[in-house]
Image (cartoon, helix red, strand yellow):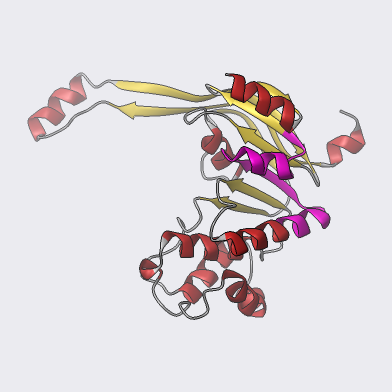
Amino acid sequence: MNDVQRESVLLEMEDVHKDFVISQSGIASIKTLLLWWSKRTTTKLSVLRGISFTVRKGECVAIIGKNGAGKSTLLSLLAKIYKPTSGNVVVHGRVAPLLELGAGFHPDLTGIENIYFNGVILGLSRQQIRERLDEIIDFSELRDQIGAPVRTYSSGMQARLGFSIAVHVDAEILIVDEVLAVGDNNFEKKCFSKIDEFRKLGGTILLVSHQLDIVRRIADRCLLLQKGIIALEGSPSEVIEKYLED
């Protein structure tokens, strides 16, 4: 990779491994605890096993694969939810992670309060949030419910609010996990229009999806993840064809 290409890289993973340690205690009493402590056993689950790839500015790269292949773990590493067991994860620029939209909401706070809560987490000041509050609410189409606690929202309403917040924080990178179809047809079209606008402005996207039509529609490049390794990298049509064959 030459210097110009290196400067354009916004996301990079280099020989990344991620393991989880699972305890097999089965503790039900103090006696069981003492016996377990003397004979404690754990299992290491290797989810990612040497992942290396880059995403350059303005690219949309999709990751596909079966459930359990490690896709969501990979995105969580880039979103800094997890730390790698080994290897390097490099992210340049502000990231808006769209992972399980609504998962970061506090159920007892109102929609407006959660906009402020999430906006601050994503790097905005309270003044910046105030300036774009109406735009976020209007995009979510939840103005009539925005003063109610989020625990009263349906999952679709939470997803719409989460998407609306994420695409209004002036991020350079969107990390998206299965959340582009978050409403009815009209709202879905509005989401794709916003994604297209984001890309025209030079935004970068890393996408995980089982919806292969979405991958074909917006991705420039595709990675096939199998059992924690990248089995194939290429054009969306090439990689999807291999995935469907398998």
x and y, in percent, of residue 210 in the image: 56, 38
Residue at the spot 68% in from the left edge and 21% down from the top edge: 232
Indicate the quadrant where residue 26 lies.
top left
Residue at the spot 53% in from the left edge and 70% down from the top edge: 115
Which residue ends up furthest to the front in the rendered image?
A: 185
Q: Which residues are magenta?
A: 195-221
x and y, in percent, of residue 131 in the image: 67, 79
Indicate the quadrant where residue 225 lies.
top right
Where, quadrant-wise, is the N terminus in this rendering? top right
Where, quadrant-wise, is the C terminus in this rendering? top right
In the image, residue 141 sits, relative to residue 39, either above or below, namely below
Residue at the spot 61% in from the left edge and 72% down from the top edge: 136
**Left-right relation of 202 to 114:** right
**Left-right relation of 25 to 125:** left
| Relative depth, front residue between 118 and 180 | 180
**Left-right relation of 68 to 124:** left
